[in-house]
Image (cartoon, rainbow, N blue to C red):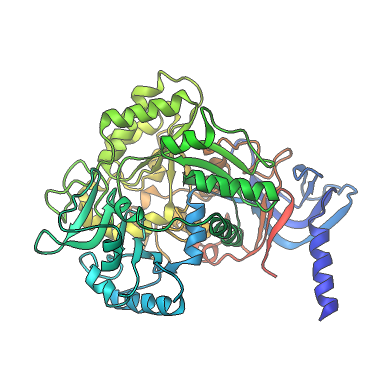
Amino acid sequence: MKLKFLAALLSTAIAVPAHADVLIDNVNGITLDEDGKVKRFEALVIDDDGRIAQVIGRGEERPRTDYREDGRDRVMIPGIIDAHGHVMGVGFGALTLDLSDTNSLEEALQKIRTFAAENEARPWILGRGWNQEKWGLGRFPTAAELDSAVSDRPVYLARVDGHAGWANSLAMQAAGITASTKSPSGGRIEKLADGKTPSGVFVDAAEELMNAAIPAPRPNERDLALAEAQKVLHRYGITAIADMGTTIEDWQAFRRAGDNGSLTLRIMSYGAGIEQTILIGGSNPSPWLYDDKLRLNGVKIYLDGALGSRGAWLKAPYADDAGNRGLPLMAPAQFRNTLVRAAQGGFQPAVHAIGDAANAEALNAITEIAESFPQDLRWRVEHAQIVDPADLPKFAQNGIIASMQPVHQTSDMFMAEARMGPDRLGGAYAWSSILGLGGRLAFGSDAPVESPDPFAGLAVAITRSNAAGEPFGGWRASERVNREQALAGFTSEAAYAGFAEGRFGRLLPGERADFVLVDTDPLMATPEEIRATHVFETWVGGRKVYDAD
């Protein structure tokens, strides 16, 4: 046993030398070149700075290097870049209660009871992932139902999309919520049938009423959450992520990890609103830190909520909730002022917009303002889920990037039909249309709202069908993208969206040696095989950060 352990330890040490040239040989390599064309190769040479020195094609001579690593004929692809995720959310999600796998209210309540019993020392029970639509409940859950599971401690659980929260009675009491508490602007306190009593669900800006009462994580807890997030993401082959909604506390955790050498994930950071962004970065975006592992790129701006909680801002009322058009989270003047403040500081604006009214507002405001800021800001619209077809051409104007999450389409397609009605979905999750009109796509997961698994996202992007193959032929199948476009969305285009092109995102000389060894060729395999992709190893900067063995 000791000999096996020592051999494994030495193997790892050889695979990730501190200062040496390394040949990664015997691979079926795939990357996209600067023109987006597929390039195949058999080996890579990594220099002592963790960059790619040479890409070796079939039949080409291998140079002498200090070390050789056998790729064992596995498929090598660029490290996956998640263009929209929440790093600390992934980490805390791994440490708290996860309800995303529950299929009914009763199943969720039982899981909550079990978690509370196993964590008696926790003063609050926290978690996320509930989805009343998936449960077939037809309504939001209530505080009384949550009380039936846990009544001795406060409980607060975020909805799967992060745009609503579910509290028990003790949690509302801790937050001072009563029948006289008014819903804040941009938020809604759900009420019981009497129209007065808070039901226990808080939508969008109303969540802050509860969040203010929850004890903030300590720095060591944040460090633990970051470590867990890195493990989770590397296991899926993710080497870089755009962190949407970074707080000063999150940034400090990233910096602590960078300073002590434990930061293995590349993080392109977008501050949680303009004030947090300025608090983190001062008057300008940060330079790249820790060998291209951390940069403050821009600012995350929320314009509306989500479809599931009926907070997405629509041009016409919800088909299943007459009179409700959702929740605009900013007045037009405030939104434009925020965009201008971001642009003046050189911060890249990343605007959360899901409903067609929110997307129209985002596209129109950017179009109005961009001409005053000719510098390369790469304006982003995050999610861009429901867009009026008349507004789709505006993405190509001023180089607006549509930062979208393919798995949202399959998670939300049937709900979207109920919320909007089929006649209003002509611009829903319109990936192919945006590309065809000259726009740019960057793909991500929105983890922990969805699983960070990029291979599920790749399969959805090329099929518009879920894991069960539904609907047959794909939902609004004309909006599928081809395999090269899907891979670009999770690699080179996601790098471009985060000002990282030329640094990482492709396996080309001069770029960082970020790659994944897998068992499936995403350009050749069936969608089912892509979904089942097994990640053997994940490397960042020429260092192995995950090994399935």
Point out the image quarter for the C terminus: bottom right
Front residue of 124/190: it is 124
Q: Nearer the viewer, residue 110 or 384?
A: 110
Q: Is residue 93 left or right of residue 50?
A: left
Q: Is residue 316 above or below residue 224?
A: above
- 387 up-or-down from 363: above or below: below
Q: Residue at x 42, y 56 (%)?
A: 407
The quarter holding residue 69 reads bottom right
Specify the farthest residue to the left: 194
Please give the name of the residue rendered at 44% of the width and 20% of the height, measured from the top-left corner. Answer: 373
Measured from the top left, where is residue 15 in percent x and y?
79, 59
Residue 476 appears at what percent x and percent y? Answer: 33, 52
Please indicate whether residue 337 sits to the left or right of residue 523 in the image: left
Q: Is residue 347 visible?
A: yes
Q: Position of residue 162 (x, y in %)?
A: 36, 55
Instruction: Answer with left or right where residue 220 lies relative to residue 113.
Output: right
Quarter of the N terminus within the rendering: bottom right
Q: Residue drawn at (22%, 51%), measured in percent from left and top?
A: 188
Residue 195, quarter of picture: bottom left
Question: Which of the two residues, 464 or 442, is positioned nearer the viewer here?
Answer: 442
Q: Which residue occupies the foreground of this view, 38 or 118?
A: 118
139 above or below 405? Answer: below
Quadrant assignment, res 334: top left
In the picture, measured across the screen, residue 251 lies left or right of residue 509, that is left
